Image (cartoon, rainbow, N blue to C red):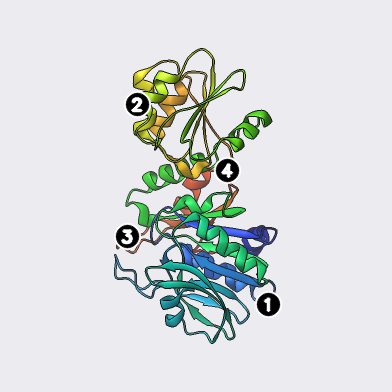
Amino acid sequence: MNDRNIFEMIKKYNTISIIGMDKNVGKTTVLNYILSKARGKVRLGLTSIGRDGEEEDSVTETEKPRIYVEKGTYIATSKQCLYNSDITKEIIRTTGINTAMGEVIIAGALSDGYVELGGPSLNSYMRDICKMLKDIGSEIVIVDGALSRKSFASPAITEATILSTGGALSRNMDKVVEQTSHCIRLLSLEKENNEKVQSLCKNIPITHRVSIINKDMTVINLNLKTSLEASKEIAESLNEHTAYVLIRGIISDKLIEGIMNSTDRYKNITFLCEDGTKLFITSDTLYKFEKQGGKLKVLNSINIICITSNPTSPYGYEFDGDKFLKKLKSKISLPIFDVKAGE
């Protein structure tokens, strides 16, 4: 991985998330790379969604890279994970945020050493922790994702995101490339730039899961507790006056297919979601929806600055690194780096 292309990329941001397409795709390798390049240059704050940094992967029973920090680094981690870390540490503050492994504690590293990261699993808590780490002097806060929890790429949490993908996702290289390309497409969905619509959406209380916005900018809030099973109600609410449908929460295949199967009125209407992390739809469903005239946009765009690829899988197989990188680059226009080859 090139210093200029990754470390220089992140220096201008206050908060960065590293998210993975799956387990064992090289996130920790990327994090350690950034930590090594930041050494002596930038004071970092580290935290994690869930738990990461354990010595052995609990699924594959293979040795995982450990997270090595320098003296002066700040970490926000659970009490148990802090106890398991071999740094000399100074407790700076407790957070009142609890996890299965104890309260999240903010500590400063008084020596170089290995740490375990285990943070909260709720976006609102992660926002608070990032702010706490910034307030005590972290120049850049890095949130280490876990499993497929892409929600921490949300622009409400971090300003920029690195996406890690790799052979661990599937034995089929083309399938990994396709899934990664589709994920990038969802996370990078076009932002709604109409300022009136943006302002209107921000003023709709978050308790309203689905709202219909008419061409004259009047709003009808549907009486729904969740958007997941709302396809029938949404379809019945669409008419010639409808311009937008704001859907808070997850947008799934079932929801989109249910709307398409119930009415033709979704065509030329723009469906809005909060950001790309809320989209759980396949490439086939998205293609069909857009092909038939549906539009899907986001209120907040996600800033993915690069992708890292790991051709090695802990499940006993490995891709040709050059071929894997070439195929990814043929489908995705973002900078892509092989975490093993250092490209």
Dot 2 lies on which element?
helix
Residue 13, given in percent of the width and then of the height, sits at 67, 58
Amino acid, disc 1: Gly
Structural distance between the alpha carbons of marks 2 and 4: 33 Å
Circle 4 crowding by C-alpha within 10 Å: few under 14, some 14–19, many from 20: few
Locate residue 23 relative to residue 46 in the image: left or right: left
Residue 333 badge: 4
Chain-order first, disc 1 or disc 3: 1
Label whose residue precedes the other's in the sequence (4 or 3): 3
**Residue beneath disc 3:** 317
Disc 2 versus disc 3: nearer the observer: 2
Q: Nearer the viewer, residue 74 or 2?
A: 74
Q: CA distance from mark 2 to mark 3?
A: 39 Å
In the displayed structure, does residue 318 sit left or right of residue 3?
Answer: left
Tell me if residue 182 can be seen. Answer: yes
Label 2 vs 4, first from the N-terminus = 2
Q: Are marks 1 and 3 in contact (CB under 8 Å)?
A: no
Q: Residues within 10 Å of mark 3 (few under 14, many from 20)?
A: few
Q: Quadrant for residue 200, please give it.
A: top right
Q: Position of residue 307 (x, y in %)?
A: 53, 53
Lower position in the chain sequence, tag 4 or tag 1: 1
> In x, y percent, where is residue 115?
48, 77
| Residue displayed at 39% across by 29% down | 256
Q: What amino acid type is highlighted by mark number 2?
A: Gly
Q: What residue is at 50 percent from the left and 48 percent from the top?
A: 326
Q: Which residue is mark 2?
A: 258
Frontmost of labels 4 and 3 is 4
> Residue 254 placed where, x, y %?
34, 32
User: Which element carries disc 4, helix, strand or loop?
Assistant: loop
Q: Please give the residue where the numbered disc 1 appears in the rendered image.
A: 40
Q: Nearer the viewer, mark 1 or mark 3?
A: 1
